[in-house]
Amino acid sequence: MTDDTKDFAPSRRQFLSGAAAAGAGAVAGTAASAAGPDPLITEKQPWAQELGAGVDETPYGLPIKYESDVVRRNVEWLTADPISSINFTPIHALDGTITPQGCAFERHHSGAIELRKEDYRLMINGLVDKPLIFTYDDLERFPRENHVYFCECAANTGMEWAGAQLNGAQFTHGMVHNMEYTGVTLRTLLEEAGLDTAGDLKDKWVYVEGADASSNGRSIPMEKALDDCLVAFKANGEALRMEHGYPVRLVVPGWEGNMWVKWLRRIEVTDHAVESREETSKYTDTLEDGTSRKWTWAMDAKSVITSPSPQMPIKHGKGPLVITGLAWTGRGAITRVDVSKDGGKTWETARLAKPGEKMALTRFYLDTTWDGEEMLLQSRAMDDTGYVQPTKAQLREVRGENSIYHNNCIQTWWVNKDGEAENVEVS
Ligand code: MTE
Ligand code: CO
């Protein structure tokens, strides 16, 4: 032990060296007495000698410039142009579960539109007694609810059907976001339009459309429409961002993102599914036997380790390591997540930051010690229906080689001795 931490009072030095001795290998910090003088501790820094920014400089705050790489990213070769395209949430760099709107993935079929509240109209027509048109102000006069839900594009992880493709949790799993929505239940508005919700609603549907050029029309069975769908106008406490459907979007908890119609303009009550483009030639799964499964609405349980991961290498060498990630299920709540360091041979149960909530992201942690050896990191989610997240091989048995959508298989990151991680597939 050197004695160049002369600035410290003896009692403080004793405490620090005591801690280092007792916890060798278990403490992530550096014992101050062993580290030599650290100018960040011993010298007065510029930020303590100058004045900071005034409260009039940032009427609406953005992340500090040092976090400028925590942004949505797209993959240019994925789509022909950026108007009908997708970008990805930087899930590797986020923690907790709420996705800030500013970095929550976007998926548009004909670009994000600017629609003023004043120009907003929502029409309910079809098999209702009283077809209605609502203004934005009208919507604000109905009783509101708040719920946190994840939204996952059916194409999330879609590239990985062809084998390990993209190097980063952001790109393999970043078509997901999780926000607290404020809105009016779809049930309330349908009742306002005279739908007899106590009557015979078997075989009834709603067909929902957006105001953008693509319209993104989707049919939703009435049971779901009346169960938990929200006509939402706020996310994470503030107005929806343009790219997420300002001023109003539909929230369809647990079901594929394509049904979450943005810039919601029309809801038609019908006695059949419209079978639009978005629910026939797209968002449909071709199976092993060559037939196509007609509907795949609920997103099955899924999880991914967000750190370490290809964009989040281990930088600190062996010793204490926090392995963390996200889990979610469109069928209820996450009950357990296991983590494997050896490609699925052995598993340890991770700690859930909070008990899983219905149709919302769940954060998990495995507080562990890294021995500096290679790892094949995997996570495996379980939900309250008893469902266990499958391996890629198990999924391929049912789905064959021809799939694009609904890939919820276990992801593997190979971590080398330098702590760098890579997307790999284990059989
Ligand atoms: N709604 C409209 N009107 N137009 C669209 O292009 N894209 C859908 C859905 N709703 C879309 C839409 C798809 S495929 C997804 S995954 C989600 O919106 C994405 O929502 P986000 O852009 O808020 O992440
Ligand atoms: Co989508």
Image: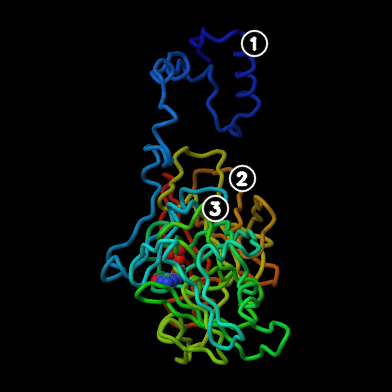
Q: Which residue is mark 3?
A: 236
**Which residue is at the front of the view, 283 or 370?**
283
Q: Residues within 10 Å of mark 3 (few under 14, many from 20)?
A: some
N-terminal of the two: label 1 or label 2?
1
Separation of marks 3 and 2 at Cα, in angstroms:
29 Å
Mark 1: amino acid: Ser
Asked whether the viewer can see residue 180, the reply is yes
Q: Is mark 3 within 8 Å of ligand 1?
A: no
Residue for badge 2: 367
The first of marks 3 and 1 along the sequence is 1
Q: Quadrant of the rendered structure where residue 130 is?
A: bottom right
Query: Where 2 falls versus 306 (above or below)?
Result: above
Q: For numbered disc 3, what is the local secondary structure?
A: loop
Crowd around label 1: few <14 · some 14–19 · many ≥20 (10 Å): few
Which residue is most to the right?
A: 198
Label placed on residue 162: none
Q: For the residues marked 3 and 1, what is the alpha-carbon distance in whole angstroms?
A: 47 Å
* Cβ–Cβ under 8 Å for marks 3 and 1: no
Which amino acid, mark 3? Answer: Asn
Residue position marked by numbered label 1 in the rendering:
11
Residue 308 sits above or below residue 148 on the image = above
Name the one closer to the observer, 287 or 80: 80
**Could you say which quadrant of the image residue 385 lies in?**
bottom right
| Residue 49: image location, x then y, percent | 41, 15
The three-letter code of the residue at mark 2 reads Asp
Q: State which tag comes first along the sequence, 3 or 2.
A: 3
| Residue at the image point whose x is 54% and y is 59% from the top | 378
Percent across and percent down for residue 422 are 40, 56
Question: Residue at point 55% right, 54% down?
Answer: 325
